Amino acid sequence: MSLDRVDRQILRILQGDGRISNADLAAQINLSPSACLRRVKSLEEAGVIDRYVALLNQQKIGKPMSIIVEISLHSQSLDVLNAFEAAVCRSSEIRECFLMAGDADYIIKVSASDAADFERIHRDHLATLPGVSKMRSNFAIRKVVDRTDFELSEQHQPLP
C-alpha cells in the first residue's frame, strides 16, 4: 500500500493521540468524517496501523528499572531458535525481544521494580529459557529518548 499525503497526516495524528475521535481527526485533515473513517479502516486492514494501545508510565506502575539482556544460544538450529522464541513469547515479564546479528543472538528487554524483582525475573523467566549458553544483563541508568511515533515522509513507503 502506498501512502499519500492524507494517509501520512492521519498516521501522524493517530500516533500522537490514538483516542482522537473520527470527527476531530477528520476536521484536522479537512476531510468529511465518512471519508476519514474509510481511510483509517483501509490503513487498519492493510496492516499499516498495527494496533491501538495505552502506553503506561514505568515509574508510576512500580517498574522503574529497565534491563537489557544479551543472550547467546548454544546452537543456531531451527529447533533451538523456535523453542527459545516460543518460550520468550510465553513470558509476560519480557517486554521486547530482538533476533540480532552480532555478538549476541538475542536482545531482551525487561522491566523490574528493584534488584530483588529482577532476581525473580532472572530466576523464574530468563534462566529457564531453552538453548541459552550465555546471558549478560545491562541495567539502564536513565532513559534518554522514548519515541513511539515514526517519521512519515514521502521517501518512507511501506512494502506491499
Image (tube, rainbow, N blue to C red):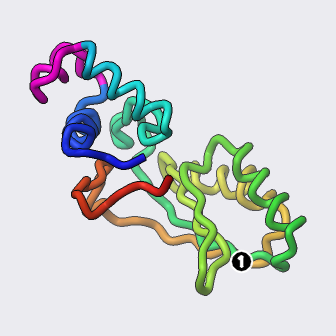
Identify the residue at horizontal 50%, vertical 52% (top origin).
Answer: 160
Q: Examine the rendered structure and indicate whether residue 61 appears above or below residue 126.
A: above
Does the magenta segment cover residue 13?
Answer: no
Q: Amino acid at mark 1?
A: Ser
- State the image coordinates of residue 95 (x, y, percent, origin top left): 55, 49
From the viewer's side, name the closer residue of 12 and 123. Answer: 12
The image position of residue 86, as x and y in percent, is 78, 51
Relative vertical location of residue 146 with respect to residue 60 in this rendering, above or below = below
Q: Label 1: which residue? A: 72
- In the depicted structure, whether residue 97 falls above or below residue 21: below
Q: How many marks?
A: 1
Question: What residue is at 85 percent from the left and 68 percent from the top?
Answer: 78
Q: What residue lies at 61% left-to-right and 86% top-to-bottom? A: 103
Q: Position of residue 108 (x, y in %)?
A: 58, 62
* Magenta run includes residue 30: yes
Pick the front one: 121 or 94: 94
Q: Residues within 10 Å of mark 1 (few under 14, many from 20)?
A: some
Image point (30%, 53%), residue name? 150
Q: Which residues are magenta?
A: 19-33
**Toward which corner of the image does residue 76 lie, by quadrant?**
bottom right
Could you say which is closer to the camera, residue 113 or residue 50? Answer: 50
Instruction: Give left or right: position of 92 versus 86.
Output: left
Dividing the picture into quadrants, the one containing residue 136 is bottom right
Q: Looking at the image, which residue sits at the far right?
A: 79
Q: Residue 112 vs residue 146: left or right?
A: right
Q: Main secondary structure of the magenta part?
A: helix
Task: Locate residue 49, reporting x and y percent.
Answer: 42, 37
Query: Label 1's element?
Result: strand
